Image: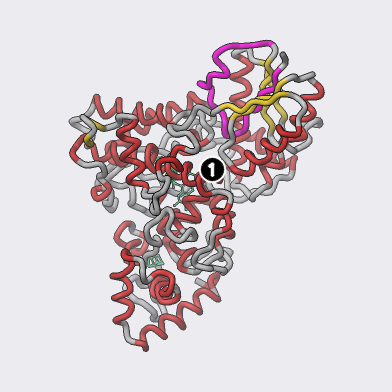
Amino acid sequence: MRKLRLILGDQLNSKHSWFAETDDNIIYCLFETRQETDYVTHHIQKVVGYFAAMRNFALELEKANHNVIYFNINDAQNTQSLVDNLTLLIRENAIDKFEYLSPDEYRLEAQLKNFSSDLSIETKVFSTEHFYTEREELGIFFKGKKQFLMEHFYRNMRKKHQILVIDNQPEGGKWNFDASNRKKWKGDALIPQEISFDINVTDIMDDIEKAGIKTIGNINLKYFEYPISRSQALIQLAYFCEHLLVHFGDYQDAMHTDKIYLFHSRISFAMNTKMVSPKEVIDTVLETYRTQEDAIDISQVEGFIRQILGWREYMRGMYWMLMPTYKKENFLENNNKLPDFFWTGKTKMNCLKNAINNSLDNGYAHHIQRLMITGNFALLTQVHPDEIDAWYLGIYVDAIEWVQLPNTRGMSQFADGGKIATKPYVSSGSYISKMSNYCDDCVYKKAQKFEKDACPFNTLYWNFLDEKQEKLSSNFRMKMMYSVLNKMTSEDRSKIKEKANHIIENLDEY
Ligand SMILES: Cc1cc2nc3c(=O)[nH]c(=O)nc-3n(C[C@H](O)[C@H](O)[C@H](O)COP(=O)(O)OP(=O)(O)OC[C@H]3O[C@@H](n4cnc5c(N)ncnc54)[C@H](O)[C@@H]3O)c2cc1C
Ligand code: SF4
């Protein structure tokens, strides 16, 4: 029986059981397509990273004696559509059975399901063997519950997988060391030089230009920043464990003008393309901890493991539990446009300038920049969630809808009315000042609310609370903020409103 097996660009798991044996009757196929490069405008480093990692993966499979058909973006026979390419290969290679790995995105799942149901040959779907949880596991865990708290899911995962658990109790006495993950970085802990791989991607860039693919952001062609093979991903992981884990938790929420990555792992691209699995990452972190328990505090390790065992699996489970309607949610009825400076980085607000320029230059911003700078500002200016999703889905090298959408629409924009976050992640300039040095060199005054040079985050914050009072004031976690707002004089409130309207109507002046 001749089989065709599809491998999508984010399914580069060389440890998958598919590859344990070779079989002359199996053909593996990978395609670079316009379907995938054009469904949103991607960052150039994201397109380059995917093509480079896919090409490496195909070469590795060939070296291991598997049959591989690879369509380069400019190949003459490439139809640029996933299903048309599959149809072509099934016909040309007299295929009897089509097999694919379960896609992580809803749109691809729907497309492949439709395609398979129309085929006259047998089809079979396999697990990607990547995640800790099956797709529907979170839905079953929360069945009948009104709230879907990450913390409950995470504790269950810790017990189920016996990670940092002794006799079913948390190692170190606490399930969560979140409270000790909030230090501002002031140069005290030294940050080692970030790891680089000296990858030249000039050829891939030529292919992208020849194909005329529209992208955003910048790239250094002689020094590509992300791992594009499993061996590089493992080097990056080892580097994190050796040099960065020791302070990861402490400075997880810190931001600094001179340090883009601080103690973050930058492992998301390698994990999301499945070059390395979450279990491998967690096991390596735990091994490091076990050999250095005197040097590394459990709070650093728990803080990191929570992101992967907790947040990452939780977001995926929530995505599959709530799609497809989730993609349309707009609880706060926000309708404004995203300011142009999100695409150019040209703004006077120092925090946004840094976070957006990092994103444009590196296809990267760490979690708190995404949540408390760009996401916070978009929410405070009441931008339509569709516009925000398109930006986040395009700009980050690690952005794939299953993880981007619940983070953006849910956690960052509260567009789901509180399914993921228990309250909107909004803040005034004081939080930004507490966690970063951005305000030190900003033209705006972090202590002013509505004066001429007042920090726009302050004005917008109080205006947001005011405008969304009907929808948010019954939220228990918002009570304190509303009591402060309601004590303000009506004169101050109208000054805030006037100034906030000016900002929202003239965003590109700020
Ligand atoms: C608005 C918004 C959009 C986001 N979009 C994406 C996205 O498209 N793709 C993506 O992988 N992550 C996304 N995140 C989560 C997080 O910001 C990134 O995973 C992280 O910044 C990647 O950098 P890192 O590898 O250095 O992470 P580290 O800080 O070193 O964390 C380690 C790993 O934990 C996982 N992780 C941490 N936080 C989350 C989270 N909230 N959800 C899921 N996994 C998490 C990631 O796999 C990450 O690689 C988003 C967060 C926000 C607030
Ligand atoms: S003062 Fe306001 S706008 Fe300027 S960096 Fe601080 S928070 Fe951002």
- In the figure, residue 422 lies in which quadrant? bottom left
- In the figure, residue 373 lies in which quadrant? bottom left
Quadrant placement of the N terminus:
top right
Query: Does residue 38 show up magenta in the picture?
Result: no
Q: Main secondary structure of the magenta part?
A: loop
Q: Is residue 444 above or below residue 143?
A: below
Judge from the rendering whether residue 146 lies leftward or rightward of residue 168; answer left or right.
Answer: right
Q: Which residue position holds label 1?
A: 397
Determine if residue 54 is in view: yes
Q: Which residues are magenta?
A: 3-24
Seen from this angle, which residue lies furthest front?
Answer: 144
Percent coordinates x, y for residue 152 in the rendering: 33, 45
Q: Is residue 293 above or below residue 345?
A: above
Looking at numbered disc 1 in the image, what kind of residue is underneath it? Val
Q: Is residue 380 above or below residue 400?
A: below
Judge from the rendering whether residue 302 lies leftward or rightward of residue 41; answer left or right.
Answer: left
Percent coordinates x, y for residue 175 in the rendering: 25, 41
Front residue (pair 230, 161): 161
The quarter of the rendering in which ligand 2 is drawn is bottom left
Judge from the rendering whether residue 147 lies leftward or rightward of residue 207; answer left or right.
Answer: left
The local crowd at label 1, few if under 14, some if 14 to 19, many if 20 or more residues have their Cα within 10 Å, is: many
Q: Residue at x 59, y 54 (%)?
A: 390
Q: Residue at x 48, y 29 (%)?
A: 130
Seen from this angle, which residue lies furthest bottom?
Answer: 491
